Image (cartoon, coloured by chain):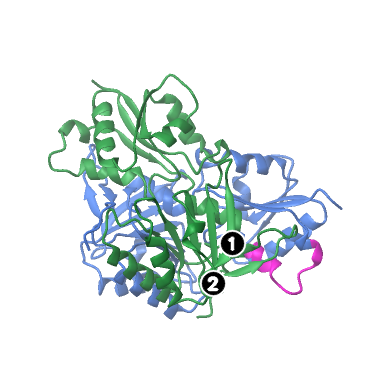
Chain colours: A green, B blue
Amino acid sequence: MSGGWLKVVGLGPGPEDWLTPEARRDLAEATDLVGYFPYVDRVPPGPQVRHASDNRVELDRARFALDLAAGGRRVAVVSGGDPGIFAMAAAIFEALDDPTAPAAWHAVPLAVDPGVSAMQAAAARAGAPLGHDFCAISLSDNLKPWDVVLKRLRLAAEADFVIALYNPISRARPWQLGAAFDALRDLRAPETPIVLGRAVGRPDEALTVTTLGAVEPSQADMRTLVIIGASHTRLVPRADGGTPWVYTPRHYRG
Amino acid sequence: MSGGWLKVVGLGPGPEDWLTPEARRDLAEATDLVGYFPYVDRVPPGPQVRHASDNRVELDRARFALDLAAGGRRVAVVSGGDPGIFAMAAAIFEALDDPTAPAAWHAVPLAVDPGVSAMQAAAARAGAPLGHDFCAISLSDNLKPWDVVLKRLRLAAEADFVIALYNPISRARPWQLGAAFDALRDLRAPETPIVLGRAVGRPDEALTVTTLGAVEPSQADMRTLVIIGASHTRLVPRADGGTPWVYTPRHYRG
């Protein structure tokens, strides 16, 4: 069958207001939606067949989507945020890169629709904490050894990057965020600003600004994006007396 | 005067297709547009007063915008990409954080509209090169010493981050990109994939995939976003025989 395609579509952090026109159009033109169920649920009702699956089955989901598209379906694989940042786009290419991948998968027209990622949403609400050199690290040790995570945190601190942490904590990974804060406390000042952006863009959004000295892992959950300031990240009071703005100046004196 | 506001609006990398509904609405509701002239020019014609300025006057532009908003105007400060990533949001907070900033500036209602940044657009076109831990570094040494840039590149290579380079080259900074490639050649294999995404999303968009061993600085210009793969970044052939896909797997064996 021909006419099938696969697009990996970034839904952004949640609200319609942050969904790009490209993503909206591709969702509307799809015959099938494939993804982790909270993301599939976020797509407005329509005639598309919905294939929602649980978390942590990304590679199965990628293979299923490629099969559907190779069979002539127009498949939108949906991701929260940007599918290229700790999300489904890499899983699609991993499936394609398998030597046993059917030739029909390689013939599927494929595209990635970028979107606003969680760190950008949290940063926008907080001010401009990512205003200078930064890194993004997934704290999950499901797919890489924990000592690699620790090594990267230490090198990122030495480089004085702002650090955005994805997947900071979950029921299955309860201690990693505390261990990450402890490792960074040896390398950065206790006054270092910390931004906790929980579910930014969703109705239950919450923004917390605290310090490396005071932050507790229990202040984050699996829907939280954590940003750890660099040595020159600063606070500015808000006019309304609320949570202060956090920004990292563009200039750096070393 | 009351009723003024200031929004720092991300236009995304260029096409209407990547402009968020939030950004579109705020541009339409603004009375004044402030920004670097190519970004102001990108906003569709309308009744807004346009205040376009040259590059590298970000702080003057920020102060001007805060003055306008404090005077009751609805001001959209426009940035390409995401204003929070190497763009205008940090400059606004720097202006506010100056001890001589008028109290009226602090009273201005302020918001940041995130957008798709250049690294995300280049990554989407190339596949999923940012699919694992990564960092973003501005190569400009206008605002930080060059030895800080070099130190960060070396630590990023040691951490095995994918590296996105903003502001890689310009007429005023002709040698820095070559020096960065040379530094990385001592630390990463010659086969390391390199993505050069030039003006992605614009009519003159171009995507190049090459290697660290082969890349020449002359292949980039000031509108190019450079992505340097990690040790496990891989290529996948495209069905049409074109530029191969580049992706970084989610798993990492160390």
Q: Quick one: label 2 or label 1, which is nearer the N terminus? A: 2
From the viewer's side, name the closer residue of B138 and B94. Answer: B94
Which amino acid type is marked by label 1? Val
Q: Position of residue A116 (x, y in %)?
A: 49, 47
What is the chain identity of the residue bearing mark 1? A
Q: Does dot 2 land on a helix, a strand or a loop? A: loop
Mark drawn on residue A209: 1
Q: Front-most of B231 and B51?
A: B231
Q: Residues within 10 Å of mark 1 (few under 14, many from 20)?
A: some
Residue pictured at 36% horizontal, 35% vertical: A35
Inspect this view and state whether residue B38 appears. Answer: no
Residues behind callouts 2 and 1 on a single chain: yes
Residue underneath mark 2: A192
Q: Horizontal and vertical percent for residue A16?
A: 55, 36
Q: In terms of depth relative to the viewer, which is nearer, B12 or A187? A: A187
Query: What segment carries the magenta color?
Result: B91-104
B103 vs A62: above or below: below
Disc 2 marks which amino acid?
A: Thr
Letter of the chain that mark 2 sits on in the rendering = A
Q: Quadrant location of residue A38?
A: top left
